[in-house]
C-alpha cells in the first residue's frame, strides 16, 4: 500500500525546527557562545541539536502532519489522535454509496486515490453487489472464505450488511457514507428511475405521486426502494416499517456507532474538508468535479416537500440526526478554519477546471466524443459530463481524465488492473496511471 507522492504542506513546527536547525549549523560558534552565556552545558546543547535535526528530517520527509491540539476532536470518532498530534493517511475504507446523493462524485475520488496508491478494491462480480439484495462477501470478485484476500477499499453500490462487510474488510477500516435531504432526493429518484421502477411507472408525474403515494405504492414490490426511504433501505433497514420514534432513534444511533463520518450532499465541499481531515489526505485527493448531475430538475413547492418528508419519515429522521452531528463536527473543526479550507478546495477545483476542461460548465453527454469519459445515460434523464482538453501534456491529461471517468468505466479499469489477463466487461484498461503527477 504505497502512497506514491510527496506531501507538500509546510508545517509551522517543522519550519521552526528547520530555521533553528540552519541557524545551529551556520552559526554554531555563535550559538555555543550563547549557550555558555546562558549557562547551558554542552550536553544540553547537543541534545538540542538532535531535536533540531529531527525537526529537519520531519520537514524533509513531510509525511506526518502536525495538528494543533486546540483543534483536537474529542468526540467518539476523533478526527485525529490528539495524543500523537500526527496522522497517517488512512487507506482501509468502507464507503456506503447511497443512491442519488452525490455518491458517484465521492466514488470517483476513492477510485483515483486507490488507483494512484495501488490499493486493492473489493470489486463486484458485475456492476454492483447484486443490489438491491443485502451485501454478501461472496459477491466480491475473487473473495474466498478460506484463503481470504485482503482489501483496502469497498465502495460500490450495495445494500449495507455489516457482518458480511466485516468478513473481508480490515478491522481498522474507516466507515463513511453520504446523505441528502429526502425531498430533493425523492425528486431526483423519481426522474431518474421513472422509466424502470414499477411504482413510478404507474404515476403519470411527480405531482401525482406526491399527492397519492399510497395509491401507486404496493409494499413488497420490486423497485420500491427508489420510491420510499431510499437511504434507510440502502443502510440495510426496512423502508416500510411504520414510523416510530424510539425505533428510528435506536437504528440511527446504531448507524452512528458504525459510521465514523456521515457526509451531506448539500454541503459537499464542507463534507470533503471533514473527510480529508479524517482520512489524513491531501486537498488534491478530495478535489472533484460534479458527476452524474441532470440537465435540469423540477423545483418543489413547500407543501410538496412536506408531503415527501412525511412519506419518507424514516429518511427524514436519519437526515435530521446526521445533519446535527455534521454541524457539530464542523463546529469542533472550527467554522473559520472550515471557511478557509472550503475556499482552498474551491480555488483548487477552479484551477483544475481551467487546466483540464474545455467548458467550465458541464455539457450534455452527446457533446462528449471521447468514449471513456461519456457519462452513463440512464432512463430518459440527460446526465451531464465534461469535455477534457485534447492538447494537454499526457500526464496532465491522464489526471484530468481520471477526475471525470464514470463509475462503471473506472470499475472496469480497476478490475482489469487487479485481474490482469482476464477478459471481461468488454473494456480495455486504458487510462490507469499509478503514479500521476499533479497538474
Ligand atoms: N459535488 C456535488 N454536490 C452536490 N450534488 C452533487 C455533486 N455531485 C453530484 N451531485 C448530485 O448527486 C446526484 C447524483 O447522485 P449519485 O451520483 O449518488 O447517483 S447514483 O445513485 O449513483 O446514480 C445528482 O443529483 P440530481 O442532479 O438532482 O439528480 C447530482 O447532481
Image (spheres, rainbow, N blue to C red):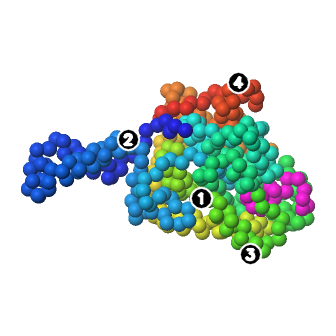
**Nearer mark to the viewer, of 1 and 2:** 2
Q: Earlier in the sequence, mark 3 or mark 2?
A: 2
In the rendered image, the quadrant that contains the N terminus is: top right
Q: Which mark is residue 61?
A: 2
Q: Label 3 near label 1: C-beta < 8 Å? A: no
Q: Label 2 near label 3: C-beta < 8 Å? A: no
Q: What distance separates the C-alpha of mark 2 from that of mark 4?
A: 37 Å
Q: What residue does disc 4 label?
A: 421
Residue numbers of the magenta segment:
218-235
Q: What residue does disc 1 label?
A: 261
Mark 3 lies on a secondary structure that is helix
Mark 2 lies on a secondary structure that is helix
Mark 1 lies on a secondary structure that is strand
Q: What distance separates the C-alpha of mark 3 from that of mark 2?
A: 51 Å
Q: What distance separates the C-alpha of mark 1 from that of mark 3?
A: 23 Å
Q: What residue does disc 3 label?
A: 246
Q: How many residues crowd around disc 2 within 10 Å: few (fewer than 14), some, or many (20 or more)? A: few
Q: What distance separates the C-alpha of mark 4 from that of mark 1?
A: 37 Å
Q: Earlier in the sequence, mark 2 or mark 4?
A: 2
Mark 4 lies on a secondary structure that is loop
Q: Residue 408 occupies which quadrant of the picture?
A: top right
Q: Is residue 366 magenta?
A: no
Between 349 and 13, the one lying in front of the other is 13
Q: Label 4 near label 2: C-beta < 8 Å? A: no
Taking the spot 68% from the left edge, 65% from the top edge, the residue there is 254
Amino acid at each position: 500500500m504505497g502512497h506514491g507522492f510527496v506531501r507538500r504542506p509546510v508545517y509551522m513546527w517543522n519550519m521552526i525546527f528547520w530555521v533553528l536547525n540552519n541557524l545551529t549549523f551556520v552559526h554554531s560558534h555563535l550559538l555555543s557562545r550563547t549557550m555558555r552565556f546562558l549557562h547551558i552545558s554542552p550536553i544540553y546543547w547537543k541534545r538540542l541539536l538532535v531535536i533540531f535535526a529531527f525537526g529537519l528530517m520531519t520537514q524533509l520527509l513531510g509525511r506526518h502532519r502536525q495538528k494543533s491540539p486546540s483543534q483536537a476532536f474529542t468526540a467518539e470518532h476523533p478526527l485525529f489522535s490528539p495524543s500523537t498530534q500526527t496522522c497517517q493517511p488512512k487507506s482501509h475504507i468502507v464507503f456506503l454509496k447511497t443512491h442519488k446523493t452525490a455518491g458517484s462524485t465521492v466514488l470517483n475520488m476513492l477510485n483515483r486515490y486507490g488507483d494512484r496508491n495501488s490499493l486493492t478494491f473489493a470489486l463486484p462480480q458485475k456492476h454492483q453487489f447484486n443490489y438491491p439484495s443485502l451485501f454478501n462477501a461472496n459477491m466480491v470478485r475473487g473473495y474466498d472464505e478460506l484463503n481470504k484476500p485482503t482489501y483496502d477499499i469497498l465502495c460500490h453500490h450495495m445494500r449495507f450488511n455489516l457482518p458480511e462487510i466485516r468478513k473481508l474488510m480490515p478491522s481498522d477500516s474507516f466507515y463513511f457514507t453520504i446523505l441528502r435531504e429526502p425531498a430533493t432526493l425523492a425528486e431526483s429518484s423519481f426522474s431518474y428511475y421513472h422509466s424502470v421502477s414499477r411504482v413510478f411507472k404507474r404515476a403519470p408525474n411527480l405531482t401525482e405521486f406526491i399527492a397519492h403515494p399510497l395509491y401507486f405504492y404496493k409494499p413488497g414490490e420490486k423497485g420500491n426502494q427508489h420510491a420510499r426511504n431510499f437511504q434507510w433501505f440502502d443502510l440495510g433497514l426496512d423502508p416500510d416499517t411504520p414510523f416510530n420514534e424510539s425505533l428510528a432513534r435506536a437504528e440511527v444511533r446504531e448507524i452512528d456507532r458504525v459510521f465514523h463520518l456521515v457526509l451531506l450532499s448539500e454541503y459537499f465541499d464542507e463534507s470533503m474538508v471533514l473527510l480529508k481531515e479524517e482520512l489524513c489526505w491531501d486537498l488534491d485527493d478530495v478535489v472533484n468535479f460534479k458527476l452524474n448531475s441532470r440537465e435540469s430538475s423540477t423545483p418543489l413547492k413547500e407543501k410538496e416537500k412536506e408531503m415527501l418528508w412525511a412519506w419518507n419519515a424514516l429518511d427524514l429522521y436519519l437526515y435530521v440526526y446526521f445533519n446535527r452531528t455534521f454541524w457539530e463536527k464542523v463546529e469542533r473543526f472550527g467554522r473559520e478554519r472550515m471557511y478557509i479550507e472550503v475556499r482552498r478546495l474551491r480555488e483548487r477545483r477552479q484551477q483544475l477546471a481551467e487546466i483540464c476542461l474545455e467548458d467550465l460548465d458541464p455539457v450534455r453527454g452527446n457533446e462528449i466524443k471521447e468514449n471513456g469519459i461519456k457519462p452513463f445515460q440512464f432512463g430518459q434523464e440527460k446526465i451531464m459530463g465534461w469535455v477534457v482538453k485534447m492538447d494537454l501534456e499526457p500526464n496532465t491529461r491522464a489526471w484530468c481524465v481520471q477526475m471525470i471517468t464514470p463509475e462503471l468505466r473506472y470499475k472496469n479499469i480497476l478490475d482489469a488492473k487487479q485481474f490482469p489477463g482476464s477478459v471481461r466487461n468488454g473494456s480495455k484498461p486504458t487510462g490507469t496511471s499509478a503514479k500521476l503527477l499533479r497538474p
